[in-house]
Amino acid sequence: MNKDELKVETTTLWNFPTQNYGDKPHGDNKYRGVTPAFIIWNLLQRYTKRGDLVVDPMCGSGTTIDVAKELDRKVIGYDIVPYREDIIQNDSRSIPLEDNSVDFVFVDSPYSDNIKYSNHPACIGKISCEKEDFFDELEKVVKEIYRILKAGKVMTWLIGDHWRKKSGFIPVGFKLYQRLTKYFDTVDLVCVTRRHQSSNTPFWHERARKYNFYLRGFKHLFIMRKPKKI
């Protein structure tokens, strides 16, 4: 799809067949857990304007940076292990920005230890979502986002649920959402169709039927607003 043909999504079900749009890369589509560029494009169109400061504290391969720059937004991308030179090395649990200084935050975080993001010992993606510690660490990120975000501005968080044979279904999204609502008001909730995941094969579909479980078909996109000061 040409970027000139893009339109802002009008429903809460987002289905993007490709990771990228237009003729320029946005992040690296070979990066494990890469964020579809359409998601960030839609969010920036709705909740930011030119010149706003956008922050991604878990920047991965840099998709947020590329989309934000293309839309004339200021942008800072952090990651505990930077994938490229314009991503700043930093732990998302302590963001080096002033209070109330950011216009928009996007997060696409690990949702367990199912993907190896890095060898860094402090990586949140090394903690299983079967442990409450996982959500405690994510809440530290939530607190930092609350601190740096301007009152009345929006943050968004993309995350999936988890299933394992030994522990069954873990509602990662709902458990995170409970933490988010301690700090932010809800603007809306979006379901993002999952594509190209490794489990989308005849082998795994047959196992899901045989052993009576469901493969993950979507991710949660939580759109939250920092309350305005009274």
Image (cartoon, helix red, strand yellow):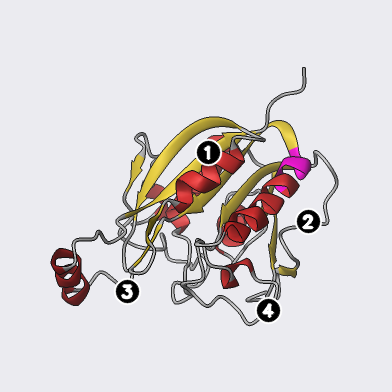
| Residue closer to the observer: 119 or 70 | 119
Q: Is residue 221 left or right of residue 206?
A: right
Pick whichever of labels 2 and 1 is earlier in the sequence.
2
Report the Cα–Cα distance between label 4 and label 2: 17 Å
Label 3 belongs to which residue?
198
**Local secondary structure at mark 4:** loop
Corner quadrant of residue 101: top right
Position of residue 191 relative to residue 182, above or below, is below
Q: Main secondary structure of the magenta part?
A: helix
Pick whichever of labels 3 and 1 is earlier in the sequence.
3
Report the Cα–Cα distance between label 2 and label 1: 20 Å
Q: Which mark is residue 95?
A: 2
Pick whichever of labels 3 and 2 is earlier in the sequence.
2
Disc 4 or disc 1, which is closer to the eye? 4
**Local secondary structure at mark 3:** loop
Q: Is residue 148 on the magenta stretch? A: yes
